[in-house]
Amino acid sequence: MSDGLQEYQLNMAVVQETADRIIRDFESFGFKIIFSGRPEEAYKELMEQLTPAIEYMLSSNGAKLMQVLYRIDIAEEKLKTAIERFTDLSFAQVIARLIIEREMQKVLTRRIYKSQQE
């Protein structure tokens, strides 16, 4: 997880909202993602479910994967940088990591924006 996001990885509300976003996004593409609700297990749990879904899309439907990345807003440049940075991870694991991080960033951005409106 990115250094800036690590402090939020055990915040149950943020973790739950992040998992909900991932579940919703992947459900719309025909994949079932389940979250147990344990924040200390969230990252591992989501990685273990996202990685095979991404591997499946890589091998059978690259266009669907591109749609997922577009919908979640994973920039191509960010993906290239992550591939170079995380050499110990498979391509699918790098994408899964980026998805989790991006979804958490969206949750945190919405929270900041909402608090400024109040």
Image (cartoon, grey):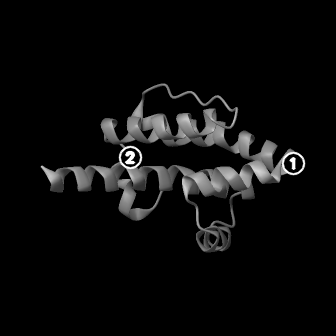
Residue position marked by numbered label 2 in the rendering = 9
Labelled disc at residue 26 = none
- Left or right of 12 in this view: 49: right
Please, is residue 78 above or below residue 44 in the view? Answer: below
- Left or right of 61 in this view: 19: left
Which of pointers 2 and 1 lies earlier in the amino acid sequence?
2
User: Dot 1: few (<14), some (14–19), or many (≥20) neighbours within 10 Å?
Assistant: few
Identify which residue, 45 or 59, lies in the foreground: 59
Give how far apart the Cα atoms at labels 2 and 1 are. 31 Å
Label 1 SS: helix
Q: Residue 75, how many percent across, how many down?
A: 59, 67
Q: Residue 38, how many percent across, how many down?
A: 42, 29
Identify which residue, 21 or 89, lies in the foreground: 21
Residue that appears at 61% across and 71% down: 85
Classify residue 116 by image quadrant.
Answer: bottom left
Number of numbered markers: 2
Identify which residue, 6 or 75, lies in the foreground: 75
Label 2 SS: loop
The kind of residue on which mark 1 rests is Ser
Residue that appears at 38% across and 57% down: 5
The kind of residue on which mark 2 rests is Gln
Asked whether the residues under the numbered discs 2 and 1 touch, taking CB atoms below 8 Å apart as contact, a structural biologist would say no
Residue position marked by numbered label 1 in the rendering = 59
Please, is residue 9 above or below residue 73 in the view? Answer: above
- Left or right of 112 in this view: 34: right
Classify residue 2 by image quadrant.
Answer: bottom left
Given this view, does label 2 or label 1 mark the residue nearer the observer? 1
Residue that appears at 73% across and 58% down: 91
Q: Residue 45, how many percent across, how many down?
A: 56, 35
User: Dot 2: few (<14), some (14–19), or many (≥20) neighbours within 10 Å?
Assistant: many
Residue that appears at 36% across and 63% down: 4
